[in-house]
Amino acid sequence: MLLARAIHFDESDTFVFHNPARTGEWAISGGFEFSNWTDGDLTGKARQAFSNGWLGVETFGRVTFVAVTRIETGELDWLTERLTEHFMTIYGAPSIEVARPVAEEELRQMMEICADHAPNTLLTVMRELTEAGVKEQYRFIEASDAGLDQFAIHSVPEE
């Protein structure tokens, strides 16, 4: 099974999101957060979260990039419970029986997004408000086969 983890290349997410996700935490689209939004809600850091933020399922912070990686059944079970609790606490789901299937569906959708990609593939999301609601598009950046020596700077110490 594949899911996605938050990844950072620099500190920019700490400046553009109210609550940035932590590097390495499991992430989903999280578009449900914006289901009742209007153009008036799209300002400042909230706009950035809407436009291109994935949702970390541990901190419920946002991140610009996620990387596809393998997930174990026990981890998926824990994420399902965490997201179920979030739907009850933050969104007022009346019971576990109501919240759990929604949490499972959110995770299943993210697993479908990741399923056709190799581990380490980077993903980005772009959202827009339409008359029909929130529209999401995904971009995939395949992992490079480049070796470390292509990035390392080699020098010979002076004798």
Image: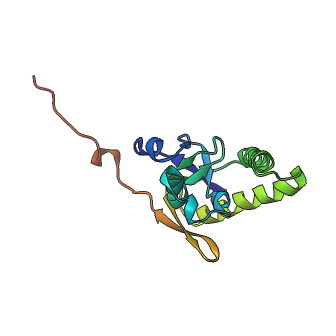
Residue 85 pos. (x, y %): 79, 45
Q: Is residue 58 above or below residue 99?
A: above
Q: Nearer the viewer, residue 91 or 157?
A: 91
Residue 146 pos. (x, y %): 35, 53
Q: Nearer the viewer, residue 56 or 79?
A: 56
Callout count? 0
Q: Is residue 35 above or below residue 71?
A: below
Q: Quadrant of residue 130?
A: bottom right
Q: Where is the C terminus found, in terms of image quarters? A: top left
Q: Residue at x 50, y 56 (%)?
A: 43
Q: Quadrant of residue 19?
A: top right
Q: Is residue 6 above or below residue 141?
A: above
Looking at the image, residue 44 sits to the left or right of residue 87; the answer is: left
Name the residue furthest front.
40
Looking at the image, residue 83 sits to the left or right of residue 158; the answer is: right
Residue 105 pos. (x, y %): 75, 61
The colour scheme used here is rainbow
Q: Residue at x 68, y 63 (%)?
A: 36
Q: Residue at x 83, y 54 (%)?
A: 99
Q: Quadrant of residue 112?
A: bottom right
Name the residue furthest top.
159
Residue 21 pos. (x, y %): 56, 43
Name the residue furthest left.
159
Q: Where is the N terminus found, in terms of image quarters? A: bottom right
